[in-house]
Image (cartoon, helix red, strand yellow):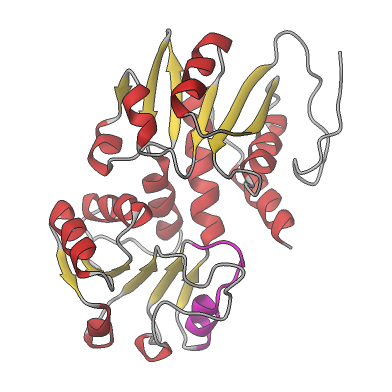
Amino acid sequence: MVQPTASGNGPQGILPAIDTRTRLYGVIGAPVGHSLSPAMHNAALQAMGCNAVYLAFHTTDPAGALAGMRALGMGGLSVTIPHKVSVMAHLDEMDPLARRIGAVNTVVPREGRLFGYNTDCFGALAALKERVDPAGKQVALLGAGGAARAVGFGLVDAAARVTLFNRNAQRGRALAQALGIEWLPLEELARHRADILINTTSVGMHPDTGRMPVPADCLRSGMVVMDIVYNPLETRLLREARAAGCEVVDGVAMFVHQGARQLALWTGRRPPVEIMRRTVLACLT
């Protein structure tokens, strides 16, 4: 048996012993070299005592990747940009929520068939609920991309009162219609008395860390502010929100919870969420 050193796989840096019974998991995307999923999942699988390894696969061929998954008997796949939509055409079945969202980030094999799920939605809601129950709360959702769509469906299902804010009117109205909520131009946010503000855009992500998706005067004490960006760990939005007396939720929380949900779907076991969180934080600091 071989016990290889695997750089980039968390603080331990050591994978479990690999043999003919080792289960293979992975993430497909393009690019994928920056992904922290291997570090997080390998730490979790090791803590769970699983004879398994999780690798990153750069590919522009999602159909071929899923064919390979079938042929090799892989235990599961994460799917990241740009394949979350295109991968759906190559699945046997989809979870109803993933179908409504229109994107899949998790593939689970069962008896020779491939099932698609969207755990981004679960991760966002689990992260938010660590601070506040969104039911009945006024939520300002920033953005109209795939992340906004996943988070939006989760919020609507959680009985939150959601208003979508986005600069692009056409995209904003289209997503608001799909969610059954109101769209307003971003300039209207300052007059909107939101209890929760969630940024699903990439504004403030490394290397443009000095930017904010909204003016600081939109933030007020008592508001819960969540940013799905996790690099940097504390975006300017979260830093300004904390200074204004807001409670903040960083992007690591969503990333960890969506990954934990993936592991639960793949293994049927409870994942070690705190170990996953510590591993990601160690990679970012």
Q: Quadrant of the C terminus?
A: bottom right
Q: Quadrant of the N terminus?
A: top right
Figure quadrant of residue 205: bottom right
Compared across the picture, whether 68 is left or right of 223 comes to: right
Compared across the picture, whether 86 is left or right of 96 comes to: right
Residue 161 visible in image: no
The image shows residue 47 at horizontal and vertical percentages of: 71, 33
Figure quadrant of residue 230: bottom right
Q: How many marks?
A: 0
Is 102 located above or below residue 224 in the figure?
Answer: above
Which residues are the magenta region?
A: 229-243
Indicate yes or no whether the magenta region holds residue 232: yes
The image shows residue 92 at horizontal and vertical percentages of: 32, 17
The image shows residue 77 at horizontal and vertical percentages of: 52, 28
The image shows residue 120 at horizontal and vertical percentages of: 41, 46
Figure quadrant of residue 184: bottom left
Q: State the residue in front, 28 or 282.
A: 28
Residue 229 visible in image: yes
Q: Residue at x 28, y 40 (%)?
A: 102
Q: Residue at x 27, y 78 (%)?
A: 186
Is 282 located above or below residue 248 in the figure?
Answer: above
Q: State the residue in front, 202 or 64.
A: 64
Q: State the residue in front, 228 or 249.
A: 228
Q: State the residue in front, 79 or 162.
A: 79
Compared across the picture, whether 168 is left or right of 262 comes to: left
Q: Residue at x 51, y 34 (%)?
A: 60
Indicate yes or no whether the magenta region holds residue 185: no
